[in-house]
Image: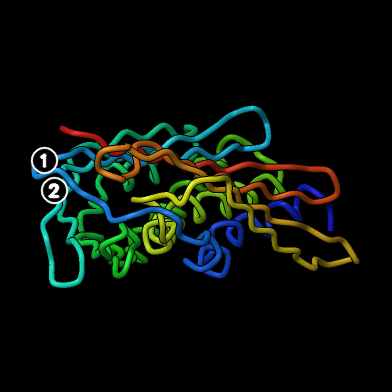
Amino acid sequence: MKRRDALGAILVASIAPVLGTRTAFAAPFSRGLINPPTEPMRFSRVLRRGLGDGREITIARSFSVHFAPAQEGFDLAGRQAEVEVDLPEQLAAFAELERARDDSAMFPISLDPFGQIAVSRAPAPMSAQVEAAVAQALAAIDRQGHAPGDRERLRQFALAVHNGGGAITAHMPVDLFAPAGGQQEFRQTLALEDGMAGEVRTLFDGETDAETGLMQTAWREIVTEVEGDRRTSREEWTLGLA
């Protein structure tokens, strides 16, 4: 297995639920109770993924949200307000799917009194539409004369981009809305074919507002590396008054 192909093989794994479990990103909690504002807020999430050739894809979503007291903490209700997608031309079909997809179904998100995520929801998968988009993407790739290895790598990447959106939503860091402070790191080693080894390293950090205890900015970086070849995904979140 070539190093490039090995990177493609673990591309989906880099954002799979096994690497995104809440316990993997939860640091020991050291902050106090949160005090959310009553005014509407704007919650934003940006996903960036490197293609390995200097290019990058970006998917940005913004949500209108508001906090409400609940029996065991707070409920965060919201709806998608805006989406921006920047994908390579070969993935135009996926770009249209991402623009059309509404991630509002992940709300409401239940938080405990300390701002830790208790319950969140994820949008239902769009398997039929995804398969159609894969077919369109592969047809475009074939017309442009890409080598078989590049074709498969782009196919895996396209699937990771779209299916990964739901995985990311479902596996947000447990302390996303009230980061514990201090960079958190999680590593997982992957055994590949031909005796090669790969590693997925995840970093998470964030800053909070002193008055509310809520996250102002946060980021999570996922680095996949095989035999010196490296590819990076990065998520960035912001939360502030609308």
Color scheme of the displayed model: rainbow
Q: Considering only order in the chain, which callout, 2 or 1, is on the residue closer to the N terminus?
A: 1
Which quadrant is home to the C terminus? Answer: top left
- Look at 75% across and 65% down and name the residue there: 190
Q: CA distance from mark 1 to mark 2?
A: 5 Å
The quadrant holding residue 120 is bottom left
Verify CB contact (< 8 Å) between mark 1 and mark 2: yes
| Apparent side of residue 57 relative to residue 191 in the rendered image (left or right) | left
Which of 211 and 98 lies nearest the eye of the viewer? 211
Q: Horizontally, is 218 left or right of 77 in the view?
A: right
The spot of residue 98 in percent (x, y) is 33, 46
Amino acid type at circle 2 is His
The quadrant in which the N terminus is found is: bottom right
Residue topped by disc 1: 40
Q: Is residue 109 above or below residue 18?
A: above
Residue topped by disc 2: 66
Residue 117 screen position, x and y as percent = 33, 63
Residue at x 54% of width, y 48% of height: 204
> Residue 223's x, y, as percent?
66, 47
Helix, strand or loop under label 1? loop
